[in-house]
Amino acid sequence: MKKENNKKSASALIGAAFLMATSAIGPGFLTQTGKFTDSLHGSFGFVILISVILAAIVQLNVWRVLCVSGMRGQDVANKVLPGLGYVIAFLVVAGGLVFNIGNVGGGALGFNTLLGIPTTVGYFIAGAIAIIVFLSKNALNAMDNLTKILGGIMILVIFIVILIVQPPVGMAAKETIMPTASMGDIFPAILTLLGGTVGGYITFAGAHRLIDSGITGKENLKEINKSSVMGMGIATIVRIFLFLAVLGVVVATATSPAHTLDAANPTADAFLQGAGQIGYRFFGLVILCAAITSIVGCAYTSVSFLKTFSKTIEKNEKWFIVGFIAISTVCMALAGQPAVLLVLAGALNGLILPITLGVCLIASQKKSVMGEDYHHPVLLLVLGIVVVIVSGYLGITSLSSLSALFA
């Protein structure tokens, strides 16, 4: 019996790590990587390094507070300031719904690139695959297995493209430490990547998965930290691999007349230029995996923000998740291009991160939340405060993008 429980616990820890990592690597992330690598070249390595450090600070703080206390993000917020949990839940679910519409679009693009399936049909196939996961007998295990398999496929496929394009690894390593691009160009890229990888629901995906598995309390702190570090490690590997794959193409074509990647889909263009039609199909497979795992992670985490407020939602969680995915799919099919909604979602995520991280840092100092014998690491607290300030700036700057909604 003990051996069986250990197996379940290990599966949940790995599942939570992959859920967090694959939630952070959606269709938007692939596009951002292509765009910034094209404009910053090797200096984008520095952007990845800084954003990974900042994201690690966020995740280590949030996972510790939520999992040690055994409370989800909205419940911790309500403990810190009654009523705040409802505000955060609304922001996370609203932002999550809009991003999920974009994720469904990414899935359709993947099917179209890989198999030539029309995007209108692809929307419904992508949504249906995600729905099937939650209709299975053991939905959490199915979700864990799906994110592990598709996450593994992404890493393998991108690595194959790296072998084909042979990027200048030495130059990338040097510029990761000493970037040549101007800080005026680098800083916005760091802020964009940070908001896209630990903003909104993504911050909570893995921690909520562990809470649902009962892996909570100070006694499980070692396993909680291990899972969060594993998740960050997986996400970092994909980021670095994708950066190198695109960089190889950008550097190789820098001397040609058409050295700029297609702005509409820079990563797909990089895969096409670097590895021909097979590379283009590989991109379809990568974006398909990224989209499906992001649809699953987003729907699961968004609904987890509502279930403690309603017994009906808690009892019928899987049906609310299915409904969330179905609404996202129908909205994508009707809207066609969710560009305006994605601007709003980006602004929402920019506002959510400093609030949610700030709430967790305050909670880390409250005995009523963390227990009498818990002591939050001082270094983690100080670094967390720095990230709140940085992400607060991101939130303020993202508000300006709301003007695009009324243009």
Image: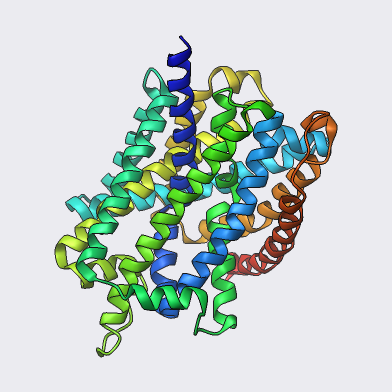
- Number of marks in the rendered image: 0
Looking at the image, residue 33 lies above or below residue 338: below
Which residue reaches farthest left?
A: 277
Looking at the image, residue 350 lies above or below residue 47: above
Residue 326: in sight, yes or no?
yes
Give the quarter of the figure containing the N terminus: top left
Q: Residue at x 48, y 73 (%)?
A: 176
Q: Is residue 275 left or right of residue 402?
A: left
Viewer-nearest residue: 70 or 310: 70
Looking at the image, residue 240 lies above or below residue 325: below
Within the image, what quadrant is residue 3 found in?
top left
The colour scheme of the drawn protein is rainbow
Q: Residue at x 57, y 17 (%)?
A: 315
Residue 286 in percent (x, y) is at 30, 53
Q: Residue at x 68, y 56 (%)?
A: 351
Within the image, what quadrant is residue 183 found in?
bottom right
Residue 338 in percent (x, y) is at 45, 56
Residue 70: in sight, yes or no?
no
Q: Is residue 405 left or right of residue 159?
A: right
Residue 26 in percent (x, y) is at 42, 52
Within the image, what quadrant is residue 144 found in?
top left
Q: Is residue 77 left or right of residue 214?
A: right
Viewer-nearest residue: 304 or 169: 169
Which residue reaches farthest top?
A: 1
Residue 12 in percent (x, y) is at 47, 28
Viewer-nearest residue: 106 or 40: 40
Viewer-nearest residue: 202 or 15: 15
Looking at the image, residue 143 lies above or below residue 214: below
Give the quarter of the figure containing the C terminus: bottom right
Q: Is residue 67 left or right of residue 142?
A: right
